[in-house]
Image: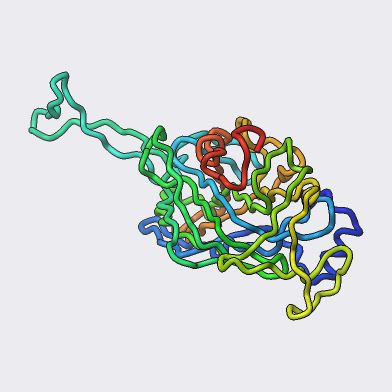
Amino acid sequence: MKHTKLTLCALAVMFAAGQAFAHTGVRDQVTVTATAGANSYNGFTITHGCGGDSGDAYPVLGQSAVFPTGDRVVWRDAAGTVLGEGGGAGVFPTIVQVPDFDANGNPILDANGNPVTHPEDKGLNLGVNGYGSVSSAFTTAQEIIDPNALSPGVVEGLFWKDGAMEPKLNTITPFKVAVTKIIDPSVKQVNIRIGVINYCDLEKNAANDARGPYKQPKDAFERKIPLLASSAAPDQINVNGAPVYVSLPAGNGDNNRQDWWFAAPYGGSALYNDPELIQPTYWTTLTVINSSATGSRVVSVEPTGAAFDAILTGPNTRPFTKGNSNL
């Protein structure tokens, strides 16, 4: 749903129904220092369903997220100007000393017998981990890695499915991050931008978005989802007397398949370029505070289009997507 295109009527419906006009965000900020990082047991906050252009809200059926990782990241200053691509930009420590080896694979030693090394940027690693068990509206949580990435075993994305969140409720999809120390004392705050997608339909892409069918949603226990408010009935209905969401042969309307919580990916994306779903400026953001900073600089880091196309592929986001283009 592209919130900036909602009509005044649709907005009135949302407020009348008691819906919070808020985007998917991150629950907690993280505080680090110049000498110590921090583990954060955190989560994405889903505050409403998909509404598209219809004014009706549909249950969220799952979620995916791509984190800035490795060399597929771009750094920006507070004004949005690009500072650089890849690595830690001198903000997070990503450069390590790597041993040199000779043609036979033996380590090269200096005159004192110490290994000869050279600096190498291993790329940004936020230490992302998913949670097991029933910890949100969705029973299945999966980690996504790219075997062809700079660091193949590092988790770059998360994916949730098998459940449903009734649109007037909220849920939190939990994750853990291990944020390193900030080595630039002039940087007071780092905004870690994360590409998050909320799914509200199955087997859809930009081409078939406005067509059916829309399958009746059920929660993780195979229970039907009560329809507590809609554009036709904006006042909340008590659960016991509420109708339920049903299958719709003609579909649930245009732009109701997904909500995208990111702006146009840097460098472009072959998979995520639908102008109806791209946000003008908004990103789901994890805020990191440097409590030992001596300056006041604010910088941000976000995944590039190449990261979206490598991590949130069609095969990695099924059953919500169809094919592997124009998702």
Residue at 74%, 48% in the rendered image = 213
Judge by depth and name the residue closer to the eye, 259 or 112.
259
> Quarter-wise, where is residue 161 in the image?
bottom right
Quarter holding the C terminus? top right
- Residue 320, image x and y in percent? 61, 47
Whether residue 297 can be seen here: no
Residue at 85%, 60% in the rendered image = 11
Considering every residue shown, the one lying at the far top of the view is 103
Judge by depth and name the residue closer to the eye, 234 or 225.
225
- Residue 291, image x and y in percent? 47, 62
Q: Is residue 224 left or right of residue 301?
A: right
Q: How many dots with numbers?
A: 0
Q: Is residue 143 left or right of residue 58?
A: left
Residue at 86%, 69% in the rendered image = 234
Whether residue 122 can be seen here: yes
Judge by depth and name the residue closer to the eye, 130 or 122.
130
Residue at 41%, 35% in the rendered image = 149
Judge by depth and name the residue closer to the eye, 225 or 317.
225
- Residue 228, image x and y in percent? 77, 71
| Residue 149 sits above or below residue 20 on the image | above
The structure's colour scheme is: rainbow
Considering every residue shown, the one lying at the far right of the view is 9
- Residue 314, image x and y in percent? 57, 38
| Residue 60 sits above or below residue 311 on the image | below
